[in-house]
Amino acid sequence: MGDLQWIWRYAKRDKRKVFLGLLFILLNAGLVIVNPYVAGVIVDRVIYQGDAGLLLPILAVMIGTTLLRTIVRYSYQIIWEQVGQDTIYALRGDLYQKLQELDFGFFNHTRVGDIMARMTGDTDAIRHFVSWVSYNVLECVIWFVSAIIVMGTINLRLTLALVAITPFIFILTNRMARDAHPLFIEIRESFSRLNSMVEENIGGNRVVKAFAQEAFEIEKFNHFNADFKQRNLDLAGVSRKYLPLLDGLAGSLGMTVLVLGGFLVINSQMSLGELVAFNGYLWMLNNPLRMSGWLINDVQRFSASCIKIREMLNRKSEIPIGAAADIQQIKGDVEFRHVSFAFPDDPEKEILADVSFTIKQGQTIGILGETGSGKSTLVNLVGRFYDPTAGTVLIDGKDIKTYPVRQLREKISMVMQDVFLFSNTIAENISFGNPYADPEMIQQMAAIADADAFIHRMPEGYETLVGERGVGLSGGQKQRISLARALTKDPAVLILDDTTSAVDMETEIKIQEKLTNLTQQKTTFIIAHRISSVRKADVILMMEKGKIIEQGTHEELIAKRGKYFEVYQRQLGGAEENGSQ
């Protein structure tokens, strides 16, 4: 499917407006023909033949035509702008919906700046094409064809002389389009890189300032900025190469009319009025030819943007969302049967290798291991953010792939390692997974997460606006609000990925005590680095390089005196021994 067919799928929702706009363009073309013809009549009939009685009616026709043409042209400009805005509104909606459907794999390999470039610059280039370029191309084609026909009826030889020049113009515009297209692709990629760099710098501005690397970041920005500038200068070089030639050839049309037309008038093969009318139509040839270069650039920009937009819209999620469907209540039994996982772009490197365990409803499973041992990847498989490359993940005895993804995730609540809060009130952040939660429930869950006290100390309490990504809150405060958000959802499966790493031991103990009563009927996964976070779990997994090297309760693993016991000795052993003396 071509780009025009593709964008028509969005524009056809306003097909009545499109039809009306086309009708007005044709009406405008008809009105454009009137005044040059009437000007010729003034010269031949009023000036040369002295028929002064025709002057006022002719002037009235010219003024009326000009006014009507102005109204018509303004009307279809407004119509096309409305069509363009409606088109881009629908397109942006589809893009945003696609973003919600795409899985972790897409976001792991796509720069934020590139996504933002597609949502802003690329969509605006398409809007510009629909709202302005499309009707200008139509205008130019209709004017050009109309001028050829009308001028041919006035004097065929002079018209043929002008038409003989136009093939050279079309050859030049074709070459310009060929040379400009790859440059627009490069400009778009350069803009994406620049966008990504700036977005990353803004997000990491505290790190930049903490390490006093402002000068380095400015130098890096200048590099990307210079590249973007050079890409645009390369495109300007193409315009510099072709546009003067195009303007020169378009200008030669006027010279041809004056020289050859003057010769025909002198030899009585054409009246002066006909030459005046002919010259009046000349701009209908001249203007389209002069605009061809600029329109070619806009069309190429549209084409480059379509490539990126369509690529994103056609992207298939590795985890298909599927249609919404009701599923029976999940109890929370979770089983891993010989599960292995590797990312698609590095299939040789296994993140998980032959992982097997079973956890029943209401039980708590603790997961320990060094950084990079596969702990977070394991729980991501429970939420089906990825599918295993081998083995099976089961919930309530059924393969997780048999559940509709959205409905499955509605039964699972996850506090991720990278805590994210929205730029909204604290209450709305906590109720994000359960919009129907009342203030009493929100406060109750915040109390369990040991967040209620510090929230009440904030200027507006639960209505305090949180800055972007929770700026202004400490790491521990963000973790506790994030935990309250997960609890408010009231899930069957609760996943806590290093949730209390930023809080002190005393606060962690209080949170664990409050969670114990709440999670008795919930299956709970706790990923942690501290043994104190998981020692009361029903099952503890000790992971290393993607494998479960030890499995059991705290007491069983201590008795084995393996890896878990070594970690225990380092973290708690000495303290407990001292405490027992």
Image (spheres, helix red, strand yellow):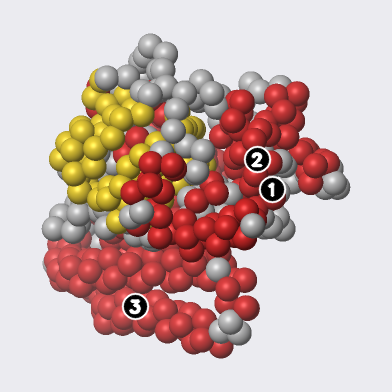
Q: CA distance from mark 1 to mark 3?
A: 55 Å
For badge 2, the amino acid type reads Ile
Q: Which mark is residue 511?
A: 2
* Disc 3: CA contacts within 10 A as few (<14), some (14-19) or many (>=20): many
**N-terminal label among 1 and 3:** 3
Question: Where residue 362 sits: x, y (%)?
Answer: 47, 23
Q: Which residue is mark 1?
A: 507
User: What residue is rendered at 58% in x and 73% in y?
Assistant: 207
* Residue at the image point whose x is 51% and y is 54% from the top: 530
Vertical side of 381 occupied by 140: above or below: below
In percent of width and height, residue 68 lies at 53, 40
The first of marks 2 and 3 along the sequence is: 3
Q: Are marks 2 and 1 in contact (CB under 8 Å)?
A: yes
At mark 2, the secondary structure is: helix
Residue 531: x, y in percent?
A: 50, 51
* Element marked by disc 3: helix
Residue marked by disc 3: 231
Residue 77, compared with residue 291, is above or below; it is above
Q: CA distance from mark 2 to mark 1?
A: 6 Å
Depth check, front residue: 311 or 525: 525
Q: Position of residue 337 (x, y in %)?
A: 21, 33
Are the residues tagged 2 and 3 within 8 Å (C-beta)? no
Mark 1, Cα crowd under 10 Å, few <14 / some 14-19 / many 20+, is some
Q: CA distance from mark 2 to mark 3?
A: 56 Å
